[in-house]
Image (spheres, rainbow, N blue to C red):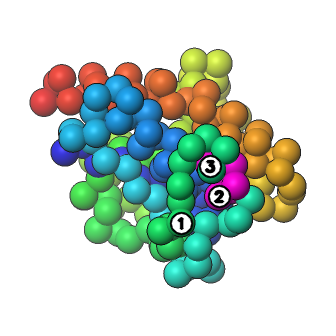
Amino acid sequence: MYRIITVCTGNICRSPMAQYVLTKALAEAGLAARATVDSAGTSNWEAGRPIDERAAARLKLGGLPSTGHRARQFLPAWYRERDLILALDIDHYEQLRADAPDEDSLAKVRMFRSFDPALADKEPAAQGIYDPWFGDEADFEASWDMISGAVPGIVQHVRAALAAR
């Protein structure tokens, strides 16, 4: 099983949105039995809380239920247990890289939007998805669009990684 985790700050907006969108895309690509996605936050600020209702509403528009989601903090053991650790913004990326226990773990940390062809050649700081929590529905729509732009590249990456095993 190829294991992916998406990571934002509190695990109530961006990372669960990315988790559910990517999970659906992997299933549509016929990879559901070979790849799995979960999510977490770099902080424990929102631990135990459900997904932000605006994120849930946007996911619902895309046919993705998220009622069972509960926020949680990223655990150090997940560096070993995950094959790909996807940061949603530069601060998550920098924290995950700083906390990585070894070179193998460090190599697993990527920006989510580094898989978007329009941004693949940009520096990590230019590949972030800003926090929609401070905004309104338009900000959650923008997050959806930014997430969706990277998903095909991630699916392609997973397919190649599985083929190489």
Q: Is residue 122 left or right of residue 72?
A: right
The residue at 85%/45% (across/down) is: 138
Q: Is residue 92 left or right of residue 142?
A: left
Q: Is residue 129 above or below residue 94?
A: above
Residue type for callout 1: Thr
Query: Which residue is denoted by mark 2 in the rendering?
Result: 56
Residue type for callout 3: Leu
Query: Which residue is denoted by mark 1 in the rendering?
Result: 67
Q: Is residue 29 above or below residue 20?
A: above
The residue at 59%/58% (across/down) is: 8
The residue at 60%/32% (across/down) is: 148
Kind of element beneath mark 3: helix
Residue 91 appears in the figure: no
The residue at 54%/79% (across/down) is: 47
Q: Is residue 139 left or right of residue 113?
A: right
Q: Earlier in the sequence, mark 3 or mark 1?
A: 3
Instruction: Give me the C-alpha separation between circle 1 and circle 2.
Output: 8 Å
